[in-house]
Amino acid sequence: MSDLNLLWTIQLAPLAVFLAVFALPKTARRAAPALGVLGAGLAAVSCLVLAARHGASHGLRVEFQADWLRVSGAGLWPGVSLTDYRVVVGFLLDPVNLLMLTLVTVISFFVQVFSVYYMAEDPSRPRYFAFLSFFSFTMTGLVLSNNLLQTFLFWELVGLASYLLIGFWVEKPAAATAARKAFVVNRLADLGFYLGIVLLFIFTGTLRFADLQPGTLGATLSPGILTFLGLLVLCGVMGKSAQFPFHVWLPDAMEGPTPVSALIHSATMVAAGVFLLVRSYGLFAASAATLDWTLAIGALTALVGAALATSQRDIKKILAYSTVSQLGFMVMAIGAGAPASGMFHLTTHAFFKSMLFLTAGAFIHRFHTNDIWEIGRSGGASDRLALGALAFGLLSLAGLPPLAGFFSKDLILEALRERGALPFAAGLLVSFLTVYYSTRLFLVIALTQKAPQAHGHAAHEHHETPVLAACRALPLVSLGGLSLVAGAAGTPVLGHRLLHWLGAHTPHTDWTLVGITLGLIAGGAGLGWAFFRDPAAAEGRLLRPAGAVRRALDRKFYIDDLYVFWVKRVGLGIAAFLNLFDKKVPNRLMVDRTSYAVLDLGKIASRLQSGLLQDYLSVAVAATVLILFFLMRSRGL
Amino acid sequence: MTVPDGFFLLAAGLVLGGAVLAVSLENVFYNALALMLSLFGVAMLFIFLNAEFLAVIEVIIYIGAISIAILFAIMLSQPMLSRREVPSAAKLFRAGAAAALVFLGLQRAIGTARWHQAPVDGDYGIDGIGKALLGPNVLPFEAVSLVLLVAIIGALVLAADPKERASK
Amino acid sequence: MMHQSLSSYLWISTALFAIGLYGLLARRNLVAVLISLELILNSAGLNFVAFNRFALVDKSSGQVFMIFIVALAAAEVCIGLSLILLLYRRTDSIDTERAKELNG
């Protein structure tokens, strides 16, 4: 099949599944899981075909586009020179895209398979699989688009899919609130994004990624404007990729089903922001100030996320904050001028983070609790498969060689060191904290003594059919393997093939950096071991009155409180004031007075209609006298 | 002042004085009587104007029939001694102003007009009137008689009021 | 001579008209209003007869008109009085300021 047809398949197969599930009659909807897996599988296979076809070539760049709107020689804004305005729609295929596409389709497939196990007892299964497929459709659309406007369209659709999936369990009010929060925070950030798109279009007349080169942009626009545009687009990235201060929606999004978190909130959707950064790197690179801001925001996010991950009890929340932190890390990489490294880390992170979430899902589904101490007490350590996958994923997250996480993280640390001492220090601190909380998570689950069966919800044996057990195991194993392989592609072992393919230079192996990293891992693990060697005691320590640091951590650095303050006090306060003002001033002065004036006028006028005979006669006589007077005046009398 | 002028002034005084009394006396019965006085003055003026037939018509029909009918209505419609409502000052002022303005306006118009005078001699007699009524003016004559017929029938219908008679 | 000048008759008729107009607008009793109306009619008739003497060649036109006026005044008084009687039967009053149901 031609490239274009493959792209259409990748794009439309999940959409077809989505429509099909809703078109089926209620009785036939039991086939929804199978349809979902089928659609995702088809998309994944098409993508792998594309990857096989183009994986070896250099300079891959295939673009299919159609003009949508074209105006020549117009000036949309005073002061902007006349330009040709052009809006297009189209597909783009280049190494970054293809990598991201592979990531998205493959992880989607495995998540669909895992969902067959996870949602086996849920009555709303068909809706779930339909929405999951819808998400695949929108995400691939986002990845494949060749211009900012189309990206924005799918950006919003992805947000919609996320809302539908977070709030999937409609009977849970917390889920609905979290879905709303996610959507609203995203929308707020997208305001900046859209403004950036509009302004960019006005100033340059085109939104195609191919046209966003630092050279051409710098030639036509002033640095100030370029920085401004870059910051606006960065706003959108901040919303979607949960950068500080728009990160507040991601932990709450854990209210949705765990496979959803695995797919959307660790690997694909939140990575869309980073993907956009890489895609439109031309725009960001055109202004050094934008990159500085990107670096700063990424660093802040990484630190905040890592810090908050160290104090959570809920396994999903730990992983969510870890995702926030790693996203910040990726953004830092791009801000430091190494988009290929950022993309690489995105890939490895996607694989092992989704695997970690699926592991969490496995634990949650079997032991019916999210709390890590509870999982341990219910016998988490006895679930070999899940525990093994957990260990594998956490080691990758911590960056232990020769796992994938090590290579991608090291590349980023190198880029940060080249950038400056402060970013490097931030990166080191984030790595240290990452190791610490990973150790904590593993130790608590693994070392907590299994409680006697007196606990109400002990791990009862699910009577899992072989199919379900396979659905549970396959994704975990596959993703684990993939994270290993994907990491290898960027290593010196395979000659940095991935990086070359992405267009980056060959990094030289810096052994001092490797040594520093290993030292960090040892230090963080040691600290975790010291604190959590005895998880029961650690839990006991949690119950002591909290110091200021722990209180700040518990309140998530008061960011949510700040938001609530702004909305409730300031926003609603202004609204209340304006309401009062509206009642007192325009309503009373203008509207009421006008109506009273009209009424009074009417009352005066109605006196003419008194019903009295002689009043009417007087009016007639007066009119006659007036006419007489004017007649006589005109005759000169 | 010659004697005819004196009588003229007497006639004028009757007309205007009677009119003033007719509109100002409170007792409406006196108003009707003052009307009769005024109409008598008008009849006298008609004689001055050589229209003797008209003077007689005026006395017989206007004073003798119309005013008597008014008197009947007065006596049938309210007791003579009760319920004297006084109009408000604003109303009186309004009426007076209207009357004054009209009078002044008309008078100025009349005063500045040059009337085309014709010889005073002529046939003022009753045969002339009769010939005119059945000659050139026969159409309005017939029309007026129709009006009178309709008026009489109408008055009878209005005054009959069968509902009230039935409910009583 | 005063009695042989047109203008003196016109003066009288104008004054009579004004007095009648005053009574029309000022009196509260409906019958009094009717009486004032008669005065106005008479002033018009007086005008006709005066002009008949001083300005017309055919000396019967004005008088014929006066006859019409008298006849029509009679018809009008006839109808008017029966209406007043009806009103009196309905509302037990012939005050002009009572009858204001067309008040708007």
Image (cartoon, coloured by chain):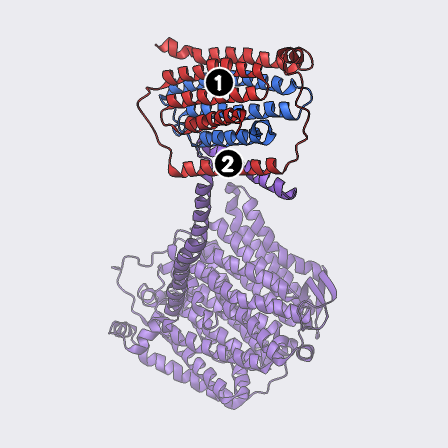
Chain colours: A purple, B red, C blue
Please, is residue A208 above or below residue A505 in the view?
above
How many numbered marks are there? 2
User: For mark 2, what is the residue?
Assistant: A619
Q: Is residue A412 visible?
A: yes
Callout 1 environment at 10 Å: few (<14), some (14 to 19), or many (20+)? many
C-alpha distance separating marks 2 and 1: 24 Å
Q: Taking the image as drawn, is residue A268 in sight?
A: no
Towards the viewer: A372 or A268? A268
Q: Is residue C103 above or below residue B123?
A: below
Horizontal and vertical percent position of residue A287: 60, 80
Q: Secondary structure at mark 2?
A: helix
Locate the N terminus of chain A by quadrant: bottom right
Q: Residue at the spot x=71%, y=63% of the render?
A: A64
User: Does residue B71 appear to the left or right of B43 in the view shown?
Assistant: left
Quadrant where the C terminus of chain A is found in the figure: top right
Pick the residue in front: A350 or B46: B46
- Residue A279 sits in quarter: bottom right
The residue that mark 1 highlights is: C77
- Indicate the amino acid at tag 2: Val
Which secondary structure, mark 1? helix
**Residue A620 placed where, x, y %?**
53, 34
Amino acid beneath label 1 = Val
Q: Nearer the viewer, residue A512 or A22?
A: A22
Asked if the residue under mark 1 is in contact with the one under mark 2, i.e. CB atoms within 8 Å, the reply is no
